[in-house]
Image (spheres, grey):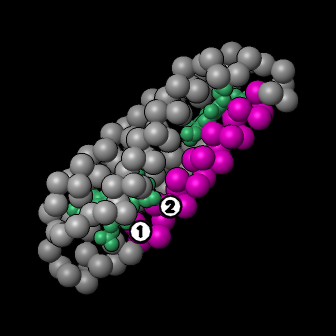
Amino acid sequence: MMAIVVVAMGSFVGLAGWRSRILTDTQEISKSRRDHRILAPWMFFFLAAGYTGGVLSLVMQEQEIFSSPHFWTGSAVLILLSANALLALGFGQEKSPARSLHAYLGSLALCLLFLHAVLGLKLGLAI
Ligand code: HEM
Ligand code: HEM
């Protein structure tokens, strides 16, 4: 389920964000912006729910919590995306530094999510 959120939602959200930054057609820009603005908070919500669910699942299986590399990459992703959401609250005018930082920080978080998925599989196979 989390892999679907990461691969399907993550790539769509990232692509919509970058399309809204790079394209020149004003209609395409506003469509991509709208898609990104609506879906990015939902993706954040599902990732935060998955984070909580992952910890609870380990608790129910009486396994050690907060100690796997998967826990650390998951925490890093949520911290990066929270900073990104805060940045999006005060973007200011077009091409502001905050917008650029948001674009690169978000892309970094998405790359980290792929490593996070590999570590998740490793954790699952070790239980
Ligand atoms: C998944 C990683 C993310 C990437 C790769 C990403 C990328 C981008 C990019 C490239 C832009 C366009 C910036 C510009 O106009 O120069 C943008 C805009 C925006 N992003 Fe993100 N973003 C991400 C996550 C998020 C999250 C988690 C939120 C909020 C919860 C968010 C909210 C917004 C908003 C509100 C805008 C402005 C849209 C508008 O101008 O109407 N983004 N993002
Ligand atoms: C993308 C594919 C993912 C896979 C294959 C995966 C796999 C797993 C597995 C197998 C567990 C152990 C619990 C269990 O056996 O049910 C786990 C725990 C956990 N997952 Fe994931 N997960 C993925 C994505 C995510 C995402 C997106 C997040 C949130 C950012 C997340 C956060 C966590 C956390 C915080 C734990 C508890 C770790 C600990 O306390 O040491 N996972 N995950």
Q: Please state the horizontal and vertical placement of residue 125, each as a whole percent of the image.
A: 68, 20
Q: Is residue 19 visible?
A: no
Q: Is residue 30 left or right of residue 81?
A: left
| Secondary element at tag 2 | helix
Query: Which image quadrant shows ligand 2?
Result: top right
Q: Please state the horizontal and vertical placement of residue 66, each as a whole percent of the image.
A: 64, 22
Distance from mark 1 CB to nearest ligand 1 atom below 8 Å: yes
Q: Is residue 123 left or right of residue 6?
A: right
- Residue 14 part of the magenta segment: no
Compared to residue 11, the image places residue 21 above or below, namely below
Compared to residue 124, the image places residue 53 above or below, namely below
| Secondary element at tag 1 | helix
Q: Which residue is mark 2?
A: 41
Kind of residue indicated by mark 2: Pro
Determine whether label 1 and label 2 are within 8 Å by CB: yes
Q: Is residue 104 left or right of residue 116?
A: left
Distance between mark 1 and mark 2 Cα atoms: 7 Å
Residue 63 picture quarter: top right
* Range of residues picked out in magenta: 35-58
Q: Residues within 10 Å of mark 1 (few under 14, many from 20)?
A: some
Q: Which mark is residue 37?
A: 1
Distance from mark 2 CB to nearest ligand 1 atom below 8 Å: yes
